[in-house]
Amino acid sequence: MRFLEMWNPLTFVGYDIASKEQVDQTLHELFSVKPHIAVIFSIAVAALSAVLGGSVETGLLALVIAGAGLLFRYFTEKHFKARKSEATRTQLIRLLVIASAFSIVAYAMSLSLLFYIGSPATQMLVMAVGCAIVQGAAGRAYMMPGTALFNIAIVIGMLSISAVAGGNYLVPVFGLIYFAFLSGFVIKMVENRERQLEAELKAELLFKEIVEKNELLRLANEALATKAHEDALTGLANRRKLDFALPRVFDAAKNEGYAVSMLIIDVDHFKNFNDTYGHQAGDECLQTLSKVIKQAVTVPDGLVARYGGEEFVVILPRTGKREARAIAELIRMRVSITNLDTLPNSPPPQTISVGLACTSDCAPDRDAMLQAADQALYDAKKLGRNRVCAHAKVTVERRSA
């Protein structure tokens, strides 16, 4: 901050770099009437000393003047609390400067009056109160140094005038030395305040940067995790995801006592399809059929995975054998009417064979269910394909690959 700028009563240290919360907190501190209550109490003690010394009217007048300053600050604080959400920061700072000037002039007039007519004991009390006021102003100068220095100058200046009027020329000299000392102290406080705000700003920016990078890292990790469990061709869950999910599905079924059904779906004569229409058409055929299968599976927590090649596995939690068969027939029907003539070489609609297994007929674990559904699929193909076959036995032998 430039030297001359610091003497401007409207200067607010760190206004450009402090956060809104910091500025609001500082304004709350500066508008608070609590420090002024301590000032009035101290002035009242000095006024009581004057009254006891015989200057009753002067002591009471000094107390009334100081009380007017306190009353003004009280209503200023109430106005600030009522208007702080509507008024701009600049308006609030101007209001604070006006309130500060009014109250400090009232306190300084009260002290000057007491010093002028007071006994040596009263004058000592007045000087002590004056020093306390300027020390308090200096201690808060890191917020608004111009206003603080103005307040210090008013108190020292008016006390010096009162002292000179009474023939005491040492007070002005002491006042000048004291003001010079406090000015240097304020300058250091302002420099420290600016460094503190700059460090806090850098720390806040660094923290935001760290948070943003952590969020990007989290999103990247989620994307990698998704890719690790996603089939690259169809976008369905892959075999790794299926192997990860099956134990959890069956454990939940055992704990909660509901049925789980499994479908293994195989595209009929897919090798001939690839040989006839090409591998590009084959890939696009699998992409199209995978969408049809996924759209047909509306069971909550249902999972559709590409098991390998042209085989798909569907997991249907909380689904009995009859409901699973209906879903399998729906998939088979939708696949059979899916138009593929937009694919390379315009292939005809394809058919699928489906093997179904349910925990009501076999053990609720991965190997038993896959074995049962695979046997049912084998039966469907053996019976002519384009059909759904359900497993009905507890123990079956899985066919060789």
Image: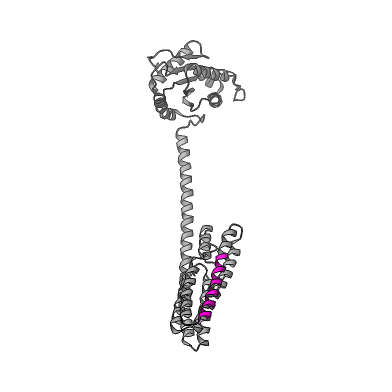
Q: Horizontal and vertical percent for residue 372?
A: 41, 17
Up the image or down, 195 lies above or below 301; here it is below
As rendered, which of 7 and 364 lies closer to the eye?
7
Which secondary structure type mostly characterizes the magenta part of the structure?
A: helix
Q: Horizontal and vertical percent for residue 334?
A: 57, 20
As rendered, which of 129 and 13 lies closer to the eye?
129
As rendered, which of 97 and 329 lies closer to the eye?
97
Up the image or down, 117 lies above or below 72; here it is below
As rendered, which of 254 and 105 lies closer to the eye?
105
Q: Which residues are magenta?
A: 54-75
Q: Which residue does the image show at 41% across and 20% down from the upper left?
A: 369
Residue projecting furthest to the bottom = 167
Up the image or down, 116 lies above or below 312; here it is below
Q: How is the image coloured?
A: one colour
Q: Horizontal and vertical percent for residue 280?
A: 55, 27
Number of marks in picture: 0
Q: Quadrant of residue 257?
A: top left
Q: Quadrant of the C terminus?
A: top left
Q: Can residue 154 be seen here?
A: no
Q: Quadrant of residue 393?
A: top left
- Based on the picture, tell me whether residue 294 belongs to the magenta stretch: no
Q: Horizontal and vertical percent for residue 204?
A: 48, 56
Q: Can residue 78 be seen here?
A: yes
